[in-house]
Amino acid sequence: MFIYYGLAAFVIILDQFTKWLVVKNMELGEKISIADPYLGLLSHRNKGAAWGMLEGQMWLFYIVTVVVAIGIIYFFHKEAKGQPLFGVSLMFLLGGAIGNFIDRLWRKEVVDFVDVTIPVINYDFPIFNVADAALTVGVIMIIIHIILDEKKNKKKVS
């Protein structure tokens, strides 16, 4: 169980460390190209949720994050026993949620810095951070878990 919470702690530490590096070493709006024009670092701040939605509604984010974190911990202890993929996915979600929650509490905004352009369709993806990436990975892993669990249950019935 400690390994799982260790994963969530690692996500939080990595998220906060990378955000600290951006805040300390880059000017707001500054861009550093890594694989121009597809990948770069862009110092950006977000006072809302994904894509800047609900900007300025910090009280809502505080409540939602606390409820979500409690729900994740509950599901981890009640449903994830003996299901490592589900447990890992929940810890990615927990780490990501807490990482952005820390920003909202201390900075009153979320530090974003990963700037990606998807080349085939030339789409400038919304700027994100380690916590956002962890949330996305966690959701994808839960979807995979559900698909695999469904297949396993169908084999049991057959």
Image: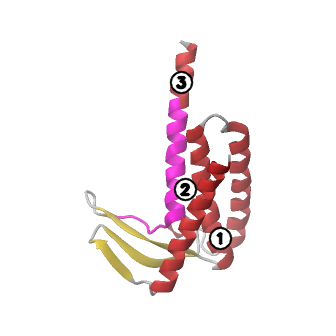
Q: Is residue 53 visible?
A: no
* Element on which disc 1 rests: helix
- What residue is rendered at 67% in x and 66% in y? 61
Q: Which residue is mark 3?
A: 152
Q: Say what amino acid the circle numbered 1 marks.
A: Ile
Residue 73, placed above or below residue 20: above
- What residue is rendered at 62% in x and 55% in y? 6
Callout 1: 10 Å neighbours few (<14), some, many (20+)?
A: some
Which one is in front, 48 or 78?
Answer: 78
State which quadrant residue 120 falls in.
bottom left
* Element on which disc 2 rests: helix
Q: Say what amino acid the circle numbered 2 marks.
A: Leu
Label at residue 127: none
Q: Position of residue 137 (x, y in %)?
A: 49, 51
Q: Say what amino acid the circle numbered 3 marks.
A: Lys
- What residue is rendered at 54% in x and 66% in y? 14
Residue segment shown in magenta? 124-148
Q: Which residue is mark 2?
A: 135
Q: Position of residue 18 (x, y in %)?
A: 50, 72
Q: Which residue is mark 1?
A: 102
